[in-house]
Amino acid sequence: MTRILDRYILKKFLTTFLFVVGILVSIILIITFSERNESFLKNNVPATEILQYFLSYAPYIANLLSPITVFIAAVFVTSKLAQHTEIIAILSGGVSYPRMLRPFMLGSVIIAIVSFVFTGWIIPDANKFRVAFELAYFDKEFNYSDRNVHFKVSPTSYVYLRSYDSRRDVAYGFTLEEIKDKEVEYKFAAREIRWDTLKTAWVAKDWNLRKFEGTKELYTYKNVDDTVLTLNMEPDDFGNMNSYEQTLTIPELEEYIAELRMKGADNIPIYEIENLVRYMSPFAAIILTFIGVILSSRKTRGGVGFQIALGFLIAFVYILLFIAAKSNAETGSSNPIFAIWLPNILFTIIGFILYRLVPK
């Protein structure tokens, strides 16, 4: 009997979840199309690219709404069972309350695993096209505006740029220093370096090189523009990095974080937080399902509508708390790991308190 009950509840829960996801994503896609249709027409965007954009946008939106959709699905299915007195019949038949929770929790684990795979690999690959599409058709023309930039290009090599022209891929006031054991081995300086697309390398112009060997200094100067530099630096490093973290799979993200650490970059927290979110977000499905079932397992006078409205409210509170915690982590005002996991920790505590209070 319990296996039949498990299949019955699991099927209802998963089909309801997929239905809610489908409805909400469809509504958002229609609204997005109506808002951006003018831009599509203005830029003469091919229909195939528009279709590909929305196909890559759909999983991104579905994952973004997953805390709401999984909670609504749990509340809707459980409240319907309660309104039809099926939960009373299940408990009266000798099935314990924890045993009744099992198919719901199994469903939430399935959703969490699928969400992790989508968040870690499928959605980032889809986002590569989506982000590039939005940068091409919706964002203003980008120009790198930072000045006096310092960063590492290897564990012992340091680069300084006075400015960078991203339209022409030219860096001005370039300096490269090699420092080992706190001693400068050489210093290469150029009035400018530019990216040569044919050589796929940087070419220096009007440069000088100082090599230090003990107390001796060797000086070289050349006013030519055909000197090729081998650098762990590309024009993409100065491109529009808006939403770039969303385009990286988990292995790519972890590799990029390691590269940024080696370079001594100051924007590492953005990518570290994104990586933490990838591992944290799937657990939201399990926690919110647990709370949703407990809140909705009693038959109330307000009916299903009241419980669904309550589900929306709690899910939005969770999302708002998550956004606030993520903002605190990005500003460095709190520990990133603690801040990102705080919503899950709080809602887990709330879930166990509610579990102790619910009649069984």
Image (cartoon, rainbow, N blue to C red):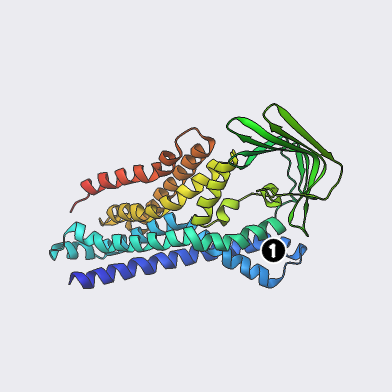
- In the rendering, at what x and y percent does residue 313 appear? 41, 49
Q: Is residue 114 left or right of residue 212?
A: left
Asked whether 157 or 173 is in front, the reply is 157
State the image quarter where residue 69 is shown: bottom left
Q: Against 24, is 215 above or below? A: above
Q: Secondary structure at mark 1?
A: helix
Q: Is residue 161 left or right of residue 346?
A: right
Considering only vertical position in the picture, is 258 above or below 285? above
- Please tell me which residue is depicted at 49% across the width and 56% down the height of the picture: 251
**Horizontal side of residue 77 vs 330, given as left or right:** left
- Residue at which label 1 appears: 37
Q: Position of residue 42 (x, y in %)?
A: 77, 62
Q: Quadrant of the C terminus?
A: bottom left
Residue that protrudes farthest toward the top in the picture: 215
Residue 265, image x, y percentages: 60, 40
The one of 20 and 339 positioned closer to us in this rendering: 339
Q: Amino acid at mark 1?
A: Asn
Q: Quadrant of residue 349?
A: top left
